[in-house]
Amino acid sequence: MAGLRLGPLLRYTDGSSATVWVESDRPCTAEVRCADGARGSTRTFRIAGHHYALVPVSGLTPGTATEYEVLLDGTRVWPPPDSRFPPSVIATSPADEGTRIAFGSCRWAAPPAGGHDPVGPDALDTLSARIAADPEAARPDVLLLLGDQVYADEISDATRRWISGRRDLAKPPGDQVANYEEYARLYYESWLDPEVRWLLSTVPSCMIFDDHDVIDDWNTSEAWLADMRATDWWRERLLSGLMSYWVYQQLGNLSPKELATDPLYAAVRDSPDGTDVLRTFAARADADPASVRWSYRRDFGRVRLLMVDSRAARVLKEDRRAMLDPGEAAWLREQVLDGRGDRAGVDAGDGEREGAREGEREGRPAGDAKSARAGDTMGAPAGDREGPYDHLLIGTSLPWLLPHLVHDVEAWNAAMCAGERGARWARLGERIRRGADLEHWAAFPSSFDALADLIAEAGTGPGAPATVSVLSGDVHHAYVAEPSWPGRTPDAHVAQLTCSPVHNSVPLSIRLGFRFGWSAWARALGRRIARHGRCAASAVSWRRTGGPWFGNQIMTLTLRGRSARLRLEQARAERDGTTALHLITDRELA
């Protein structure tokens, strides 16, 4: 009899359909049955000895929340008979009731039940406990996990013991993940946590990777990548990281319509064992990052979410460094401006042509490039002066706007590494870049400015949304920063909203460093450093309007009509041994 190894995870939802991800312990038919009669089923597919299914559910009733159960070969495996949690549900709230989006990043695996937690209460665990205790309370409509869902380079003691029973930790990569099986163990450890398992079964989720999903400072520079490729373990690590990300995270990001036209998904499912098919795909993604797109779009009524890959899509050549390759940048522009009248039509052409080329490379018909990538709901007709969306969310694991000192140091470092002060400074710059993790948007100055221009354009003129928010994590603190453009005032409220970690350490050095980094003294120091690098002045300036806040935390945006409200809550231990989310800030954005 087939058993449920991991999941279920409720991934995609809209008004009438959903997808539910599961991992079973053997081949089987996975089925989801809802209390209102909606259902779906599919056969599992096999990757590296593991069995998975992404079950499409259709026939859901808009504006309802229906309980569901999971069956494997006709036997119910979820919810477990002894569950202490309420039944898992699939909710299809009508768009006019607003959208509540919770987000954060950087979740190190929770310790075993009853074990000491060295990094403090887990914000996702605590959120789950609150929802479970009061099912009638407001819950997120979607959970955005903005990177570092697993830590391939910072494993727990339990996983270290498990790996040591498989291979010699004295040989590279030592006590880090080496292959697909060890990645599967990371996800198992992280998502089997009871609170998180139930939360992910009942709140839809969207995910994107960051560096620790593969390795710290992944794709920092061309020299870094060359050094990694010279090792005898990196290729297996990277291919396993991309393969496992596709299985455990990326598949669930896509809508049923996108999945139906995805050639890789079809090839994996049609094969008795999809390991070689998926490995070939990962190898191509490594050899030619521009041939694969990990970014994606989701529309929630009149809220548009663009989840942007700021890791794998980088151009690392020093003379043309970019956070996004040209095709990725064109795609982002197309999605931002889609439905915005003539501008969208003109600018989308380049994106569509690039998409067509990608479709040809991936074996899709050229005409399907846009539909397979753009998302399930394409917004209002061009020319609609109200615009296609009221709120634009750009999810990028790395913050666009950083503390001013950090920004200026990264821009200076990019100039040094590019040879602005000669070869000696370039060599020093590369060492500093790696040692200080200088690889955010500011370290790619042309990309930083391009994103600033795109955001200003998106937020200005007829059809402008009420808000444009850049959602990020990575930096192990939370803050709100608001930009301004000299001589230009967008009609939308624009903000950088950063929230991390969900569950990780925040050492004193980070607290002191970022507090100073936001100060006036640090800003003056940063200007001096930037002058040494002969850095051009940025087209945008910004100020911190909230934070910095430190702790294990989660942010929530509540978007209703053209209003937007932001809440930040931190997980803290209570005297009775429980944990609770404490309100840190609650403010209107628009």
Image (spheres, grey):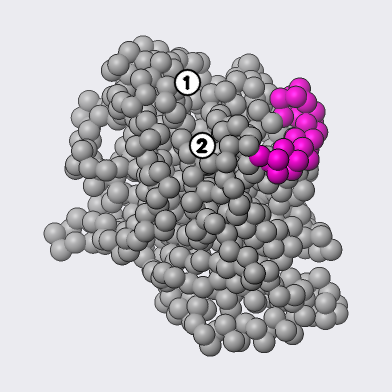
Read off the residue under disc 1: 56
Residue at 65% of width from left, 28% of height from top? 372
User: Where is residue 468 shown, x and y percent of the image?
Assistant: 53, 53
Is 539 in front, or is 329?
Answer: 539
Residue type highlighted by circle 1: Pro
Residue at 38% of width from left, 19% of height from top? 60
Number of on-image labels: 2
Residue at 33% of width from left, 40% of height from top? 199
Specify whether residue 343 is painted magenta.
yes
Q: Which of marks 2 and 1 is in front?
A: 2
Q: Is mark 2 on a helix, strand or loop?
A: strand
Mostly what secondary structure, the magenta segment? helix
Rendered view: 579 above or below 201 = below
Read off the residue under disc 2: 299
Q: What is the span of residues highlighted in magenta in the rendered image?
A: 341-369
**Within 10 Å of the Cα at label 1, are there few (<14), some (14-19), or many (20+) other Cα atoms?**
many
Question: Can you tell which mark lies on residue 149?
Answer: none
Q: Which of marks 2 and 1 is nearer the N terminus?
A: 1
